[in-house]
Image (cartoon, helix red, strand yellow):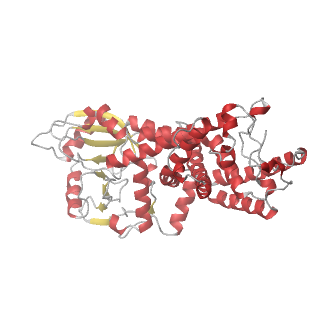
């Protein structure tokens, strides 16, 4: 939502209330400026920032809170997550029996996550009616004594507990379910457009600025609008890569754009290889996307013995499953294999998996992260970076700074608009809206811009379609306004400020 040099040139009048100083250009012969690309980018940056700003602000603030929730969970749920260190450890089968005795017939066993380290608890997870997509009911068991330490609803492969899941839902859909996901797709998609437009304007300004350092840090001594603009522009250039990354990776979770990303990955064989769990079938059974764990957790129908958990884990240890964070899933139905899967998302990524016949303990299939297609690895890393899990605390701090910076830029943008807002005082009508673009554009230029917008809309509907509508509507409004407003008798050329 930054305003270009033409706006800043009248800043003294905006801050003091005086009229813009008269220059020799006012006596120049009338001319019609043909510049339209940069003014158009400025208008897109301005209007998109004004209209989409609230969505981006909510996404940024909720994202900043989300990245610190792992530490909050360790404090809020300390009793459930930790247990006294003992010299003995119960077999997994015994821990499962204890959890099943606690649950009774209210739910069906879905998975087990053994305690990853001494002092941690084992999660025995159950599928139960009434839970949301990818939710399970987790019973936390002390692996040394068998004490039930807690009973909570957990979400997804990340194992998010209720606090983090609540913040995650706020960030993803405002707690409005599937319809609410349109908000986050709108924010993620338009964030990239606003950033690219703003960066282009910043580069153009950098080429003509005398004090280039003022575009990398706020100008000292600046006041009013100039001070706000300095912070907005300099903060934006330092955050541009992080903002673009969050925009691109966030789109992969979206409803329409995310579906198109999945379709593209499938067409180019960039999907994650999936384990084949059908007994008697060797080789991978298809592929799974980066967010394949977000479906409804179905209750297994096959009868299983709790002791088999220990047996299949021992076999998996001899194969490729050898890190602390592990999930064991019993067969979903008769004729299916057990799955033992690494779920460590920190670097180095460990998501190897193995399918095992529970009767014969023979390995049915295995998938190693090392064998993933490069683009599938890249997608996995992007998701883990976006969630703040890949590099631990450092990753979290960087994301927090980026998210807080984006939120600050939105607020600065609105403050800039407030400084230049339209008023009834003719002497102060500086024009809050950057001026003419499309009336100065050739027909082919308008057609090209609309065609590009429609092309973007094919992949990102919540960007392309509103963008095309804005360009067409803006062209009509500006054209009608230009026909109604007579040229100034002073012969002054219209600058890039629309006077309301």
The quarter of the image holding the C terminus is: top right
Q: Residue at x 54, y 59 (%)?
A: 261
The picture places residue 114, in percent across and down from the top left corner, at 24, 47
Q: Is residue 236 visible?
A: no
In this picture, is 428 found above or below 247?
above
Relative to residue 21, is residue 447 depicted above or below?
below
**Direction front: furthest residue:** 24
Q: Residue 124's image quarter?
A: top left
In percent of width and height, residue 212 lies at 54, 53
The front one of 190 and 431 is 431
Q: Horizontally, is 196 left or right of 488 in the view?
A: left
Residue at the limit of the structure toward the top, as seen here: 424
Q: Is residue 163 left or right of residue 238?
A: left
Q: Which residue is rendered at x = 57% and y = 45% of the image? A: 187
Q: Quadrant of the N terminus?
A: top right
In the rendered view, would you say 92 is above or below 106?
below
- Judging depth in this view, the residue of 415 and 366 nearest the camera is 415
**Which quadrant of the view contains residue 2?**
top right
**Where is residue 458 drawn, in percent x and y?**
65, 59
Q: Is residue 221 left or right of residue 143?
A: right
Q: Can residue 425 be seen here?
A: yes
On the image, the x and y values in percent for residue 418 come to 65, 34
Query: In the current view of this chain or complex, which residue is farthest to the left?
Result: 87
| Residue at 55% across, 49% down | 188
């Amino acid at each position: 939502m930054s305003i270009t040099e033409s706006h800043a040139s009248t800043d003294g009048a905006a801050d003091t209330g005086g009229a813009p100083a008269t220059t020799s250009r006012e006596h120049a012969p009338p001319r019609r400026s043909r510049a339209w690309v940069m003014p158009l980018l400025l208008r897109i940056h301005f209007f998109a920032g004004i209209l989409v700003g609230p969505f981006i602000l909510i996404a940024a603030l909720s994202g900043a809170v989300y990245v610190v929730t792992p530490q909050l969970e360790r404090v809020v749920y300390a009793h459930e997550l930790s247990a006294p260190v003992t010299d003995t450890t119960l077999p997994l089968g015994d821990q499962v029996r204890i959890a099943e005795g606690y649950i009774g017939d209210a739910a069906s066993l879905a998975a087990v996550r053994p305690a990853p380290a001494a002092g941690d608890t084992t999660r025995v997870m159950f599928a139960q009616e009434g839970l949301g997509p990818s939710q399970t009911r987790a019973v936390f068991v002390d692996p040394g004594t068998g004490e039930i330490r807690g009973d909570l609803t957990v979400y997804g492969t990340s194992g998010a507990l209720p606090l983090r899941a609540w913040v995650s839902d706020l960030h993803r859909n405002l707690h409005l379910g599937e319809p609410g996901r349109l908000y986050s797709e709108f924010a993620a998609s338009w964030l990239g457009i606003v950033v690219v437009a703003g960066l282009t304007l910043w580069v153009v300004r950098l080429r003509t600025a005398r004090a280039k350092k003022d575009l990398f840090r706020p100008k000292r001594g600046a006041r009013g609008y100039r001070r706000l603009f300095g912070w907005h522009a300099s903060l934006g250039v330092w955050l541009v890569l992080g903002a673009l990354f969050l925009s691109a990776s966030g789109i992969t979770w979206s409803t329409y754009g995310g579906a198109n990303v999945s379709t593209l990955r499938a067409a180019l064989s960039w999907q994650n290889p999936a384990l084949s769990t059908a007994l008697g079938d060797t080789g991978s059974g298809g592929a799974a996307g980066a967010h394949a764990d977000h479906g409804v957790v179905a209750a297994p129908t096959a009868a299983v013995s709790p002791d088999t958990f220990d047996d299949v884990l021992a076999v998996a240890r001899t194969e490729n499953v050898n890190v602390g964070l592990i999930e064991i899933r019993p067969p979903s139905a008769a004729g299916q294999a057990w799955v033992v899967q690494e779920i460590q998302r920190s670097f180095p990524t460990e998501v190897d998996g193995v399918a095992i016949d529970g009767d014969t303990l023979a390995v049915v299939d295995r998938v190693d992260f090392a064998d993933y297609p490069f683009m599938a690895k890249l997608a996995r890393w992007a998701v883990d970076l976006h969630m703040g899990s890949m590099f631990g605390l450092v990753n979290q701090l960087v994301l927090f700074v980026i998210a807080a910076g984006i939120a600050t830029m939105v607020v600065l943008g609105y403050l800039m608009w407030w400084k230049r807002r339209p008023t009834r005082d003719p002497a102060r009508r500086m024009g809050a809206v950057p001026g003419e673009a499309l009336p100065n554009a050739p027909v082919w230029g308008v057609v090209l811009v609309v065609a590009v917008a429609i092309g973007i809309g094919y992949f990102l509907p919540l960007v392309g379609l509103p963008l095309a509508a804005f360009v067409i509507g803006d062209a009509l409004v500006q054209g009608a306004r230009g026909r109604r407003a007579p040229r100034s008798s002073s012969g002054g050329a219209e600058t890039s400020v629309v006077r309301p």
